[in-house]
Amino acid sequence: MEDTSLAAAGEGAFARGGPLATLRALASLFPEPVHLVVPARSEIRRVADLRGKRVAVGLPDSGTHHTGLAVLQAHGRRRPPSSSRPPTPLRRR
């Protein structure tokens, strides 16, 4: 669900303030690219291959987070597994 829809419904980052019934969108200001990055040796080749894997989708309530969740949802994944710790940084070889 895009940020505008979340705001209109009073969900996600907009839950505390409730629905914005008078909100109207005039135009899209910029496209938001999405990157799915895995190690070169990974067997992951498509979004469906992420099933059962831990996936980082950006900081909570960020545009990246909402876009990442939308991509996963579009491919049949309801919600990424939650983690109380940040993802392990990649190590240079």
Image (spheres, rainbow, N blue to C red):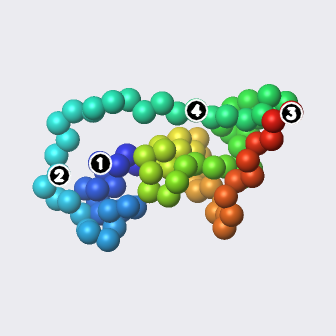
Q: Earlier in the sequence, mark 4 or mark 2?
A: 2
Estimate the spatial distance between the alpha carbons at disc 3 and disc 2, rounded to whole Å. Answer: 49 Å
Q: Earlier in the sequence, mark 3 or mark 1?
A: 1
Residue carrying label 3: 93
Residue type beneath disc 2: Leu
Disc 1, SS: helix
Q: Residue 20: percent from the left, percent from the top?
A: 20, 60
Identify which residue, 93 or 62, lies in the foreground. 93
Q: Is residue 69 above or below residue 26?
A: below
Image quadrant occupied by the C terminus? top right
- Is label 2 in contact with label 1 (beta carbons under 8 Å)? yes
75 relative position to 90: left or right: left
- Is label 4 in contact with label 1 (beta carbons under 8 Å)? no
Residue carrying label 4: 35
Q: Is residue 57 above or below residue 44?
A: below
Q: Residues within 10 Å of mark 2 (few under 14, many from 20)?
A: few
Residue type beneath disc 4: His
Q: Earlier in the sequence, mark 2 or mark 1?
A: 1
Residue carrying label 2: 23
